[in-house]
Image (cartoon, rainbow, N blue to C red):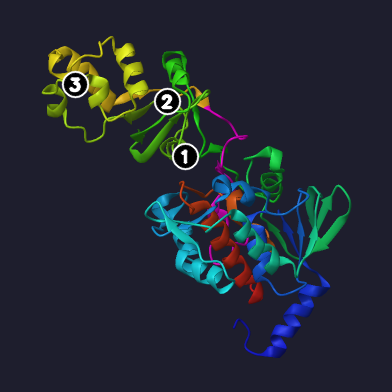
């Protein structure tokens, strides 16, 4: 498919076999790249005992692979770069590839594709397809240098050499699963700009004024959150550290510091409350525990809605624009992804190759591209790996 003749394909594979491509990382993007490359053409260096550690726990073990609604607008990152990569291997092509290998993702939550039973189904395919490459497990990359046309990759066990190095090391999220900043260190050594990193798709801790949220731990309610004009809709889960849940995780992608606004009563009909003989906690579209906690904070008695004074109604309406500043986030140990990374202006979107250093490639989460909740980050991992594989298989640099 990618070669003008079979002889050329054999010659390229032989070249790869003589000096395998070095892939740093053992996550989604690394495994997809290893799956797409010719047999025996790559060596994968993974700090974990088993590859795909993060895939296993994704989505509570269900793994949200991709999304039916797919475009650059669901990502933080340079839109032209993201669009170019996604266009080459979009959600339809990914689903077709998965189905060709026996996995038929199911559509849930309107537009999100999940593994039918567990994330192991996706991981099994990636491991089966990538087993044609050499894996070095429990091995940490310490440094990468270049002399002439060759890269020298130093690990805690050996030094490997190759003309091609692909950094697929991910971000800083889930350090207990082997996450590290080695990808950023490699990028900076070769003159790349690394934008500020932060935990993303993560819960918020709260300040003293919102400590009452902790008393509601385990309760969830539907909300709409506005962060600097970015609107995130879904459930908010009160937790012992603060707040979490899909809407909050999405909102964290856009939050750096400052205030957020939460609408706890989106689309609520106030006339219904004002004419009701039922207690407020029975009319407002929130769990009673949540309503009563807010009534206490607003100094309003839980009484018949029709007995509310105009001043009390105005105070209640603050719940449609409840504004506060989170104290921070739950941190990298709880974050699903890392925001920020290697600046994409310095990467060729057609090949994923560094514009600073020939033979050096960056794919997946290590780049300054971060998707919203809903399968977008897995799609990015697979799309960027595909573009990189296509480039290498064509012999482009």
How far across and how far down the image is residue 370, in percent?
Answer: 51, 48
Local secondary structure at mark 2: loop
How far across and how far down the image is residue 268, in percent?
Answer: 21, 32
* Image quadrant containing the N terminus: bottom right
Please state which of residues 308 and 148 is positioned toward the viewer in this rendering. Answer: 308
Is 335 one of the magenta-colored residues?
A: yes
Mark-to-mark CA distance, 3 and 1: 39 Å
Q: Residues within 10 Å of mark 2 (few under 14, many from 20)?
A: few
Q: Which residue is mark 3?
A: 278
Going from the N terminus, do you reach mark 2 or mark 1 first? Answer: 1
What residue appears at the point 44 percent right and 38 percent down from the top-left corner? 254
Bounds of the magenta segment:
329-355
Number of on-image labels: 3
Q: Which residue is mark 1?
A: 253
Going from the N terminus, do you reach mark 2 or mark 3 first? Answer: 2
Local secondary structure at mark 3: loop
Whether residue 149 can be seen here: no
284 to the left or right of 57: left
What residue appears at the point 34 percent right and 27 percent down from the top-left corner? 287
């Amino acid at each position: 498919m990618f070669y003008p003749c079979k002889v050329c394909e054999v010659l390229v594979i032989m070249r790869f076999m003589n000096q395998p491509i070095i892939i740093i990382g053992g996550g989604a993007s690394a495994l997809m790249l290893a799956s797409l490359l010719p047999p025996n053409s790559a060596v994968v260096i993974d700090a974990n005992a088993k590859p795909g550690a993060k895939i296993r726990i994704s989505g509570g073990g269900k793994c949200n692979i991709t999304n039916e609604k797919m475009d650059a607008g669901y990502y933080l990152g340079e839109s032209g770069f993201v669009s170019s990569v996604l266009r080459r291997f979009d959600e339809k092509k990914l689903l077709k590839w998965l189905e060709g290998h026996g996995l038929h993702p199911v559509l849930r939550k309107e537009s999100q594709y999940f593994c039918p039973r567990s994330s192991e189904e996706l991981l099994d395919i990636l491991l089966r397809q990538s087993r044609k490459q050499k894996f070095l497990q429990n091995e940490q990359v310490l440094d990468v240098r270049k002399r002439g046309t060759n890269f020298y990759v130093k690990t805690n066990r050996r030094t490997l050499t190759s003309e091609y190095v692909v950094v697929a090391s991910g971000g800083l999220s889930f350090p207990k699963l082997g996450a590290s900043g080695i990808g950023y260190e490699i990028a900076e050594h070769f003159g790349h700009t690394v934008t500020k990193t932060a935990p993303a798709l993560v819960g918020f801790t709260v300040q003293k004024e919102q400590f009452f949220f902790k008393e509601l731990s385990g309760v969830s309610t539907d909300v709409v959150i506005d962060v600097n004009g970015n609107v995130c809709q879904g459930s908010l889960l009160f937790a012992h550290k603060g707040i979490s849940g899909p809407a909050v995780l999405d909102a964290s992608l856009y939050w750096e510091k400052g205030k957020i606004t939460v609408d706890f009563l989106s689309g609520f009909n106030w006339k219904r409350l004002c004419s009701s003989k039922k207690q407020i906690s029975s009319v407002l579209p929130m769990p009673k525990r949540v309503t009563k906690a807010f009534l206490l904070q607003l100094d309003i008695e839980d009484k018949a809605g029709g007995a509310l004074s105009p001043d009390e109604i105005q105070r209640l309406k603050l719940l449609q624009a409840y504004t506060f500043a989170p104290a921070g986030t739950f941190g990298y140990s709880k974050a699903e992804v890392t925001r920020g990374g290697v600046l994409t202006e310095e990467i060729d979107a057609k090949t994923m190759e560094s514009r600073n250093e020939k033979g050096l490639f960056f794919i997946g989460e290590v780049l300054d591209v971060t998707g919203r909740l809903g399968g977008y980050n897995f799609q990015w991992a697979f799309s960027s790996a595909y573009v990189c594989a296509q480039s290498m298989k064509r012999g482009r640099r």
